[in-house]
Amino acid sequence: MTGQSVLVAGGYGVVGRRIAAHLARDYRVLVAGRHQAQANAVAAAIGHHAVGREIDVTGVRSIAAALDGVTAVVSCIDQPQRLLLNAAIERGLAYTDITPHLVELGRGEAYDALCIAAKRSGARVVLGTGIVPGISNVIVRALANNLDGAEQIVTSLLLSAGDTSGPASLDYFAKELTMPFQLHIDGQDIAAHAFTAPTLTEFPPPFGTRWAYLFPFSDQVLYPRTMGAKTVLTRLSLEPPRLGRLLAVVLRIGAARLLELDRVRRTLVAHRGTSKASSDEPHFALRVDVAHGTQSASATLVGGAQADAAASGASSTIRALIEGEITAPGVWMPEQVIDPARCFSRLAEHSLHVQLSAVSRG
């Protein structure tokens, strides 16, 4: 074990406990959350070098105490005020998270302010390191390297309603369903809505061709800035397909205004509960398509529980930060600072194998 201490905020959640277990093999891990007893219980179950620590991400004093002696931070908790992120930057720590707050950061002064603060303090921050954003961004970088650029980026994610996911991910999904957002097409921002413009998308086996719908995954916000992309689209497909069709119809007929978040959440939980999918079967699939000039290439990834994949992506990023692979201070997206080969090698250790296609011309 090295002398590095990693605080995993939300460390007893569905994804957080997986991240903590991955990292505890090599680092001292602080499983942190609002309830000390739960943090202690998860730390004890992990063993190795894990201990529990209390943190309330809405309290400045609690955050300051939790960061005592910490080298790096992984946040699995949504931060409306970003107090933990700001505190990590002020202390010059390494930091990454899996929470989807990039939309508000990408289209204003907030992102630039964070970048300036991190460069001043020496903090190294990588935002969005789950699946999408996260692994998908590293794939974009790998494809762009093969194409010498990325003018068009299309990310398509297939998720199973029968997969293991925590209440936070369900709440996020419900909110995004009824939230208008903007697409970046040919250099212009265009208003859009979730679960519109269905497109037949070829996912890897065992899923095959499925309808994928526009969805506001937050990585699309920063690709024009980080990759110089002129067109960025992100799509979501659901398993079973009938759930995607149902949501598309409900939203299309204008019932979105009547959909309270609790009702949407209950619907998703009901589908998850009735799913017959085996734990040994794939529960998610990812496809990324990148085009530059007359050339294009794609990549796919299929895996079991999405929580496992998100944890693998986040733990790979924190290892890159701790082990000195990312040296420049600042606030970055994965495609800017993560080495694809090293990332894919770490993912393969968790049975996640990225398949890159050959470059197509014309």
Image (cartoon, helix red, strand yellow):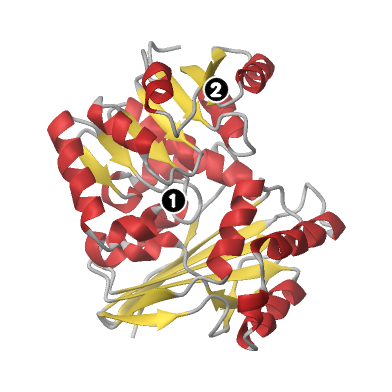
Apparent side of residue 293 relative to residue 209 in the rendered image (left or right):
left
Taking the spot 44% from the left edge, 36% from the top edge, the residue there is: 316
Picture quarter containing residue 17? Answer: top right
Q: Secondary structure at mark 2?
A: strand
Picture coordinates of residue 106, whole percent (x, y) = 29, 59
- Front-most of residues 288 and 64: 64
Q: Are marks 2 and 1 in contact (CB under 8 Å)?
A: no
Picture coordinates of residue 66, whole percent (x, y) = 43, 19
Compared with 24, 150 (above or below) is below
Q: Which mark is first along the chain, 1 or 2?
A: 2
Compared with 18, 115 (above or below) is below
Residue picked out by circle 1: 134
Quarter of the C terminus within the rendering: bottom left
Q: Amino acid at mark 2?
A: Val
Taking the spot 25% from the left edge, 52% from the top edge, the residue there is: 110
- Front-most of residues 161 and 298: 161
Whether residue 245 can be seen here? yes
- Front-most of residues 331 and 138: 331
Picture coordinates of residue 292, whole percent (x, y) = 28, 75
Residue picked out by circle 2: 31
Taking the spot 57% from the left edge, 34% from the top edge, the residue there is: 16
Picture coordinates of residue 344, whole percent (x, y) = 45, 45
Apparent side of residue 199 relative to residue 162 in the rendered image (left or right):
left
Q: Secondary structure at mark 1?
A: loop
Mark number for residue 240? none
Question: What separation in Å lies between label 2 and label 1 (alpha carbons)?
Answer: 22 Å
Compared with 25, 135 (above or below) is below
Apparent side of residue 23 relative to residue 85 in the rendered image (left or right):
right
Say which of marks 2 and 1 sits in front.
Answer: 2
Q: Amino acid at mark 1?
A: Gly
Whether residue 348 can be seen here? no
